[in-house]
Image (cartoon, rainbow, N blue to C red):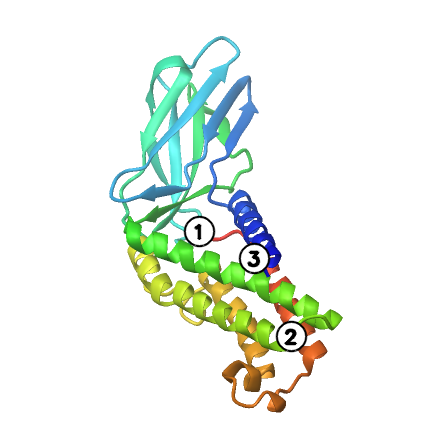
Amino acid sequence: MTKKILVAVVITLVLLAAARRLSKNNPEDLSAAHGGVTVTHTTVFEQVGPGEPELVIGVEPSEGAVAPSEGAGAEIVYRIPGGPAGEVQRIPMRPGDGGSWTGRLPDFGKGKNIEYAFEVRADSATVARLPEEEGRFLRLRYKGEVSTLVLVLHVIFMFGAFFFMVMAALCANDLRKGIGTKKLTVKMVRWLILFTFIGGWPLGFILNRQRFGPVWEGFPFGYDVTDNKTQIMFVFWLMVVLLGWGSFTGRSPETDRFGDKEYSVAVLLASVLSLAIFLIPHSL
């Protein structure tokens, strides 16, 4: 059992690290070149707490930095997703040192999504756009501050959920081989269900409320990726629970719909599906 625990801890840490790397909430370094001008920008994907997000670009033409002159400059072009097609707002940017230009978006409050791009001009013509593709924008989300206690508890319970998911899979694999017990596998599933429920719902509700405003944005109330991932994973494991309900309750294992090998396959399948869903980039 000690070996299984160590393996489960390592796998869980690897999963969390992989999910972090795959997250869409990571800054990216972008650049676009057109008409002898190169525009660079490190994306800003969030504004946490009240404030006006600051956006900075670098502009490097072939002969030094762009200098402010009549008809020349840079603008932030932004729009609100779901608004009227083609409707955008523009904010002039201020020149800084070394070819940098700075501008600030308005403070829209937590939960709001904004799409933004940049246009750099020389004289009256648009020289470069970032992103280069016309009609493509970068996304920024306004978020509220989350209490440290809630965030730590949420992380602990979600870590626990995946730890017990890995433990359930390891025990199920032994059960499939005929060297493990269904009782131990079910025990891991019980802990998995408990940690997933508490981490995903009571704590998830508080976290979502503090971060985005609404209590829950999963189906049928919304289409938030993270909330819907939690729901789908929980459904998978509820099906596993129902297939071994007698063993899960500890009252009548003989009434289980699946025998040992069939149940082990169900647990392994739920684990694989949960892993695939978990690795989809989350929204937090």
Check disc 3 and report its element: helix, strand or loop.
helix
Left or right of 11, for residue 205: left
Say what amino acid the circle numbered 1 marks. Ala
Residue 70, label in figure: none
Q: How many residues crowd mark 1 within 10 Å: few (<14), some (14–19), many (20+)?
A: few
Mark 3 = which residue?
5
The residue at which mark 1 appears reads as 85
Give the amino acid at mark 2: Thr
Picture coordinates of residue 202 (x, y %)?
Answer: 34, 67
Q: Are marks 3 and 2 in contact (CB under 8 Å)?
A: no
Residue drawn at the location 41% of the way across and 54% of the way down: 155
Image position, residue 119 (x, y; %): 44, 30
Give 37 or 272, whichever is nearer the viewer. 272
- Which image quadrant: the N terminus? bottom right
How far apart marks 1 and 3 lie (CA) works out to: 54 Å
Query: Can residue 156 be seen at all in this image of the molecule?
Result: yes
Mark number displayed over residue 181? 2
Name above or below for residue 240 compared with residue 13. Answer: below
124 displayed left or right of 170: left
Residue type for callout 3:
Ile
Residue sitting at 44 percent across and 66 percent down? Answer: 195
| Residue in front for this viewpoint, 41 or 86 | 41
Q: Position of residue 36 (x, y in %)?
A: 55, 17
Distance of mark 3 from mark 2, alpha carbons? 16 Å
At numbered mark 2, what does the secondary structure look like: helix, strand or loop? loop
